[in-house]
Structures are given as C-alpha cells and as structure tokens.
Amino acid sequence: MPLLIIAGLAAVALTAALLLTRRRVAVGPNGTAVSDAMRPIVRRSTIMRFAGLAIGLAAAAAIVTAAPPNWLGLEAALAAPAFTLCLLAGVLIGDITGTVPTGPDRAAPIEVRSVRSYLPRFMTGAVIALGATLAVLLTVTSRMGSADDMSRAGRFLTLSCQDLTASSGPWPGVYYSLPIAASVLIGIAVAAPALHAVTRRRRPAAGDAVRAVDDDARRASARTIVAACGVLVAAPLTGTGLFAGTAMIGNTCATTAVTALGWTALVLGLTAFIATCWFAAMAVFPHRAARR
Amino acid sequence: MTFEVRVDTASPVPPYEQIRVQLSDLIDQGRLVAGDRLPPVRQLAADLGLAVGTVGRAYRELEAAGKVSSRRGGGTRVTAEAAPQPPAELARLAADYVAAARRLGTTDRDLIAAVQRALTP
C-alpha cells in the first residue's frame, strides 16, 4: 500500500512538474537562447523538487500509519521532519546533478554569489523567529513535564494544589521534545549544504539575460529550502503549542499564571498551524511566491 | 557589467595561467578596481569545471604579484597597489601641459576647462 501511494504521488508530481516547466522558462529579451540554456536546469530542479515533495508526503504518511502503538503520538511529531528531509534532498539533488561543464571551451562570470543574496528575507526571518519560539517553548515544557504512570519522563504535566495532585497530558516534555529537537537540527544540517549547492551551481551560459533567469531559478530553490525549514519548525510548534496549551488549561490545579501560559501556547500553536500551511504552499510553488 | 574568464582546456597554455593572465589584464585595464572581490576559488573552479587547486594556483600567483590579497573570511580582493597607472608618456605630456599653462599664468580651473573643451568633439 505505501508503495502504491508513493508511485501515485510521484506520477502526479512529475506530471505537474513537466507541465509547469513547459511554460515557465522563456523570459528575457533574448527569449529563445535563454530558454534553451535554462530549460534543462529549471526542468531538472522542478522535477526533483516535486519528486522530493511526493516522496516526503508518502514518507510522512507511512510514518504516521505504520508507527507502532508504543510511540504514543511521536510519529505525528516526526512526520514533518521526514517530509522536510525528503523535500530538501530533492532540491539538493536537483541542483548538484548534471551541472559539470563539458567541452574544451569554458566560461565563468567574475562574480561573487553568496547564499544571502538568494535568501527570501521575510521568510527567513519568520523561520528564525518560529525556530527561536519552538526552542523556548520546548525548553519550558521539558522543565515542567513529569513522568507518566509507566515512568516515561516528561509525558504528563503534574501540578499540586492544597491536598490535590492533578496530571494532564499528553504533555510535550522530554519524551517528545528531545526527538523533535534532534529532527529539527538534522533538518537544518541538511538545509545548509542544500543552500550552498544552489549558490555554487554553475551558470548555464554567458549573458545578462541568462544570468537574470538563472538567478530567479536559484531564488526559487532557496525559497523552497527555507519554506521546508519553515515546515520543519512550524509543524512541531503547532503540536507543542496545542498540546501544551490544552494540558495547562485543562489541569484542575492550574494557577492563573499557568492558565495564561496555556492560552499563550494555544495561540502560538494556532499561529504556527497557519504558518505551516503558508510554508507548505511556498515550498510547492516558490515561483508564485516570487511574483507576489 | 560582469566580466568573464574563459578557459580553453585544449590549449597548450595551462588553465591556471589562462586564468591568471585574464584576471591580471582586467586589473591592469582598470576593469577590476581596488577592493573588487574575486569569485571564491571553489565557485570559480565549479563554474569552469576545473580542480580547486588550479584556480587556487592562479590566485596565489596574483597574490605573489601584489595584485590581489586574500583574507580569511573576507575573500580575495584587488589591492590598492594594483590600481592601473596611466602610461608614463601620458603622464609626461600632462606635466608639460600643466607647466606651460602655469607659465602663462593660467588658473587650475581654466586649465581643466581647456582640457574639457579639447575633449569635446
């Protein structure tokens, strides 16, 4: 069954990629030459991006459906990193393959291409802000968490008031926060070389027109990578915020401060959910994001 | 305006020498001026499909000639000493003109205006 899902999603993705690249490349004053030079690059990167997207969706679905019951919801937290890693791998492969120059006569522009020049500023800022928020929230929930009835650390929020002790959960303590943090760090570790690959990919041909279109293609790839990182941090922030908020508000021993913290976490979770949807859309259609 | 480096791998001239000569010419002609940054070695090597050491050798020779300087984290930049100098003959003619104009009691402003009028077709 997972194989069928993967094959179906890959077929849909490849068809979409071919249709999208067919009408995207011919721009600039010297349309035909630019199109000839850029078409293989745009086609390869788009196909690999969509392939990564399809495999990522299938991998996320496989993790969620095939996870053993004793994972206790951890599979939902790891689905987003699995999706992101596959998407990043697609972008990375699309930008590093088939770019070796051939023939004796070779040319290169004297220019300095840096990662920063291709990064989308607002989106990068949003990812950094959400990443910092996730780090703070996971630190707080890890410190507040306590063991559940099976002695699994950090799965419940246990509060005491007067003679009563109340537990609520599931709680995003160390049981969940450590795998989430590790998967986010792994995703960022893959995103960095992917961004470098986008920057270092050689120019397909000489000329200002080709350079302008090539820079657009690089910006689209960089936007996909940053958007994938956005999904990587926003998806676990959604789960962490919603579960932490629900547990804090629902705990009978919650003080006013804890309840306020719970509502804050809930709002953060909902905001992160909207951000996750936005980042996912940007990852799929980076060219459309550029036109706005 | 972006300049290009071209390499013919079938040429008997080694690729590093081809790169060195072209970059040196661009600096001498004033197309690359003091402070301009050269592409990172790895980037230029990837763009040309050459080994990193090949481009690195060209950069090292330019550095030895005092035309560029490399700094960790700052990349490789054209040095101020490598700024193009006007030909000696042109400098001598300019000095003669200035000396002759001063003998006539011409002010610097009139002296420059005369040159500008002469440049106007």
Image (tube, grey):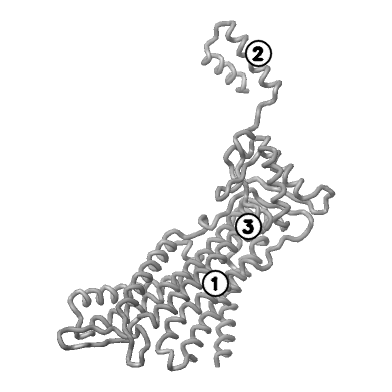
Residue B41 at x, y percent in the picture = 65, 52
Residue pointed to by mark 2:
B96
Residue A130 at x, y percent in the picture = 38, 68
Dot label at residue A31: 3
Residue pointed to by mark 1:
A88
Is B47 situated above or below A145? Answer: above
Q: Quadrant of residue B33?
A: top right
Measure the C-alpha gap from mark 1 to mark 3.
Answer: 30 Å
Residue A36 at x, y percent in the picture = 67, 62
Are labels 1 and 3 assigned to the same chain?
A: yes
Single out the residue that lies furthest toward the left. Answer: A162
Q: Quadrant of residue A277?
A: bottom left
Amino acid marked by disc 1: Leu
Measure the C-alpha gap from mark 2 to mark 3.
Answer: 54 Å
Dot label at residue B113: none
- Camera-side residue of A116 and A291: A116
Residue A61 at x, y percent in the picture = 49, 86
